Image: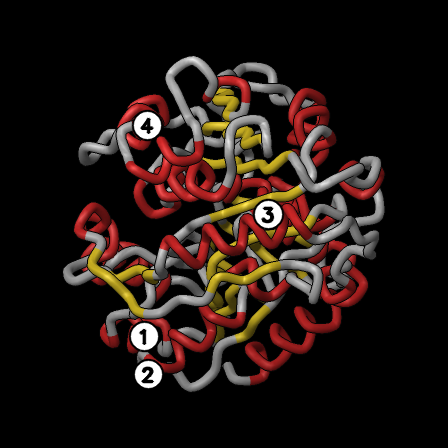
Amino acid sequence: MKTLVFETLWANPADGWSIAARAYTRMMLQAGWDVRLKSPVQVFTQSNPNAEIEKYLPLTIPVRNWDAYIFSCPLGGFANMQHIFEALEATRRPRMFYTMFERTHVDPLLAAELEKLEGVFVPCEKNGVRLIAAGMNDVGVVPLPYFDDDPHLTLPPPSGTRVFAWHGRWEPRKAPDRLIRAFMRAFCPDEAELILKLGPLPWTRTPFPAPEYVIAAELDSYEARENGWTTENWPRSIQIVDALLSAEEMLDLESRTDIYVSGSRGEGIDLPAFRARLAGRRIVTTASGGPEDFLDEDDILVQATSSGRAPEYEHLWGPDVRLIEYPISDLIGALVEARARPVKLRAPPAQNHFAAVVPIFNRWIERCITAR
């Protein structure tokens, strides 16, 4: 059995990056690798890790020799990544990299550094296309895997098309403020419901209005007044959940929704949308990247019409950061269409089942090792 060292942030129970890292780890084990997990920072921020994290603790046993080494982190800007590239340069070959990103363009200097490694894989096609456009010759696309014991597969199917949901960090890139405005312009009070589940980490880098302020501002718009929204009636149709929920409470929340909707300007995976897709919910999303790979004909895609500056993220990703743009009218139309379409039962995305992902990963990593 060949040994694979996978260095990534993996031990946070609720963080999306760690959740995806654990899914990839489990897939690597299924692919026949002796996986050794390593974290670039202190593994635990709590004294008692939950049962899921404890399952992966035996994989943290150090090893001196390995057949492959994969480092993993989000793709930051060129300046922010220099210490990582320096560390990888000093690491014994073969050295691979798993990453993802949300912006529409990648600095060619980053692509040049990544090209020095034996291989790079990303979770979605759009990430791969953008790295190739930046100058890379070859990029693997390894879809996020799911497994037969995923509890989202057993949620009851949606009973209607009335309840929309959005989950995530309240931040400019995800554009939840646009979603609120689109919802209030698409529907009258009590015609549909929107449940917003906010993540535990608030956005503090730049000013960004809280959901209640967005709603208050929208109440002053012509469209909201025409639809009959008032200070008194909006809480009947828009629910804001900002409490930290357990896994069981999140599943209960997801079981009460019919449609998952995202107005995001950029995603590498969009884990909440992926989980909703596993649960058989219709997805309404923008052409933000990650979700495009697991949609089918029952989902509704709002196309990007251009890209726009996102200065809030320049400290992370470098100068002239750009994210997708789309007309809010197109998102409004997608919400109305999703509400009007009858429920359709469907299977989860076959291309993301771990049995389909294993051979993709093995072909990619063997190609990387051969290129050493």
Mark 4 crowd level (few <14, some 14–19, many ≥20, 10 Å Cα): many
In the picture provided, is 170 more to the left or to the right than 15?
A: left
- Determine the CA span between mark 2 and mark 3: 30 Å
Residue linked to disc 2: 135
> Foreground: 76 or 57?
76
Q: Element type at marker 1?
A: helix
Confirm or deny contact between disc 1 and disc 2 (CB under 8 A). Answer: yes
**Which residue in the structure is indicated by mark 4?**
219
Q: Which residue is drawn at 81% across and 63% down?
A: 355
Residue 134 vs residue 211, the one in the foreground: 211
What amino acid does circle 1 point to?
Answer: Ala
The percent coordinates of residue 273 (x first, y second) are 59, 47
Residue identifier under label 3: 273
Q: Mark 1 points at which residue?
A: 111
Q: In this view, does 210 lie above or below 123?
A: above
Q: In this view, does 148 lie to the left or right of 28?
A: right
Looking at the picture, how far across and down is residue 213, in whole percent?
A: 29, 24
4 or 2: tag closer to the N-terminus:
2
Q: Are marks 4 and 3 in contact (CB under 8 Å)?
A: no
- Residue shown at 54% from the left, 74% from the top: 140
Amino acid type of the residue tagged 3 in the rendering: Ala
Q: Judge whether 110 appears above or below 348 on screen.
A: below
Earlier sequence position, callout 2 versus callout 3: 2
| Nearest to N terminus: mark 4 or mark 3 | 4
